[in-house]
Image (cartoon, helix red, strand yellow):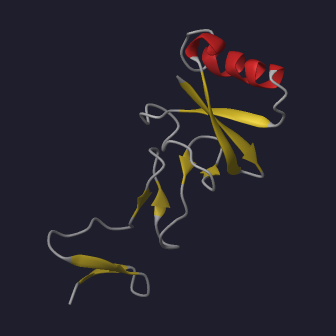
Amino acid sequence: MAHFAKIENGKVTTCIVVENEDCGGGNLPESEAIGQAFIASLGFDGDWVQTSYNKDFRGQYAGIGMTWNGSVFHGPSPYPSWVLNDDGLWDAPTQKPDGDYCWDEETTSWVLSE
């Protein structure tokens, strides 16, 4: 099965599943163009981007409300200081220490949980 996300203004609005045969049975990037043509032949308009259920490409598996930035699918940033990585996940500016710590955006640091 191949999975596609409809993108409107950079956001995922719909997700569908397409049979591998309807995507040429190949791999990205060839499968995407064939799948997009198949989706259009069904009468679905818009921009459709292939996503990976197993997260093999394009960051996270697309879900409604997620963002497509042209490279990866990702959810919202948990904090303004965090940075999006190549896997579509948000990283803190500093590594979390071992133990029971939580992020403090005001100081942009990890603080021991009480």
Image quadrant in which the C terminus is located:
bottom left
| Vertical side of 2 occupied by 82: above or below | below
Residue furthest out toward the left: 99
Q: Which residue does the image show at 44% across and 36% down from the upper left?
A: 55
Task: Judge by depth and name the residue closer to the eye, 59 or 44.
Answer: 44
Q: Which residue does the image show at 48% across and 44% down from the upper left?
A: 60
Residue 21: percent from the left, percent from the top? 60, 10
| Vertical side of 67 occupied by 83: above or below | below
Q: Is residue 8 left or right of residue 50?
A: right
Q: Is residue 80 left or right of residue 111?
A: right
Q: Which residue does the image show at 20% across and 70% down from the upper left?
A: 97
Residue 27: percent from the left, percent from the top? 54, 16
| Image quadrant assignment for residue 75 | bottom right
Residue furthest out toward the bottom: 114
Residue 73: percent from the left, percent from the top? 56, 46
Q: Which residue does the image show at 23% across and 77% down from the upper left?
A: 101
| Vertical side of 34 occupied by 63: above or below | below
The number of callouts visible is 0
